[in-house]
Image (cartoon, rainbow, N blue to C red):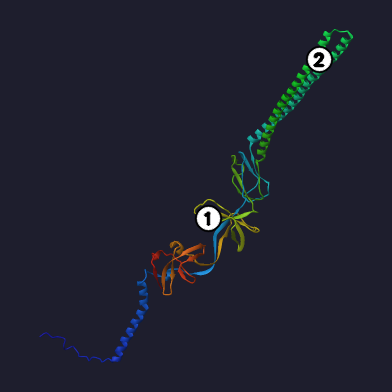
Amino acid sequence: MIRDTSAQDRAMSRPVVAPARRYWKYALAAGIAVALGAWILPGMLRTLGSGGSVSAERLRFADVKRGNLTRDISAQGRVVAAVSPTLYSPSGGIVTLAVQAGDKVAKDQVLAEVVSPELNNRLMQEQATLQSAELAAERAGIDNRKQQLATQKAVDQAEIDRQTAAREVERTQKAFQLGALPQLDVMRAKDALQKAEVTLAHAKKDSALERESLDFELKTVRLTRDRQRLLVTDLQRQVDELKLRSPVAGQVGQLLVQQKANVAANAGILTVVDLSAMEVEVPVPETFARELAIGMPAQIQNAGQQLTGELSAVSPEVVNGQVIARVRFSGEQPAGLRQNQRLTTRILIDERPNVLMVERGPFVDSGAGRVAYVVGKDGMAERRTIELGATSLNAVELVSGVKEGDRLIISSLDEFKGAERIALAR
């Protein structure tokens, strides 16, 4: 026979467990199950009743409050000179610089000189032509007086001839009355008087016409002389402008050419910065361009000091999504400002008192300003339709859809995908 393991087996007695101890274990397990259900079930119910679940740690929240909303623009501006003229060469030539970059200059101080041999030579030629024109005008004046004397002499001679003829008529009439001369001689004397009177009349007319002609010729010569004077004056002005003078008192900003360089006409030579009138050039986003207006107040931060200013100019051109605005100091300009120095500038657009507002966040752009999610006490975020008013860099005005004390999600709403309710997981 094949042996089995019955010889190795040993019978064991079954322990007796008390009924109370067995029930206590069952009660403990049931209690733990109930507690876990009470803790997990509400979250499961919220999740099942919502459009999704999002971790609250990934979101930003802000409370709706009432206060004064200040619309402003804050940007890093740079200091520029309100008056910064550039001096140009009026003519081609060799430039001689009298200053260096950074030198302080006074108004009308000579900063550079352009030597133009062609312009100087032309000036001397025109000056010589002017002298010839002046001599011609003087000669014409002398000839005019001579001609007038000659015509006047002819008039005087005709006047004497008339007087002689008149006396002859008187003498012949007396002799005819005494019977010394025939009547024919009297008639001849009268004819001679009449001829002398005609000659005198023509002499006076010729003298008047000759005087007008001489005056016209003299005026023509003098106009030629005056024209030459104007030409010389203009050339002299051009030669004087070859000495470039500072239009303002300030500082030499930049030299655009080298010493003794050959420059063309209208070429830039150097720039002058008026340090007494500085402004801050501020880049402003294109979205705020329509709301900017000349005279808006501004605040400028300079080395921990807050200065006041006002908007003085706005560029009409948009470059890279920005417009350039200029802010002028309202009070006394601070000392020590330098060209292109960076200053934090804040332009105050508008201030609205006692409005509902919330901290600005990505929800404004992702929700197109029409949607927000309000967080309830049950840990659910409910989608609401809102209307936004004025916006600033830090806050937005809420016109409708929420009330004071509501808690909003201000982070991006893209991940909610338009769900009506969102469960916020801890």
In the structure shown, which secondary structural element does the residue marked by tag 2 occupy?
helix
Task: State the image coordinates of residue 401 (x, y, percent, origin top left).
Answer: 46, 67
What residue does disc 1 label?
290
Residue at image x 33%, y 85%? 28
The CA distance from mark 2 to mark 1 is: 98 Å
Left or right: residue 272 versus residue 32 is: right
Quarter of the image that includes the N terminus: bottom left
Identified at 84% across, 13% down, the residue is: 169
**Residue at the extreme front:** 177
Q: Quadrant of residue 149?
A: top right
Badge 2, how many Cα within 10 Å: few under 14, some, many 20+? many
Q: Is residue 39 above or below residue 90?
A: below
Which residue position is annotated with label 2?
Answer: 193
Q: Is residue 255 above or below residue 346?
A: above
Q: Position of residue 32 (x, y in %)?
A: 34, 82
Badge 1 element? helix
Image coordinates for residue 176, horizontal then vertical, percent: 87, 9
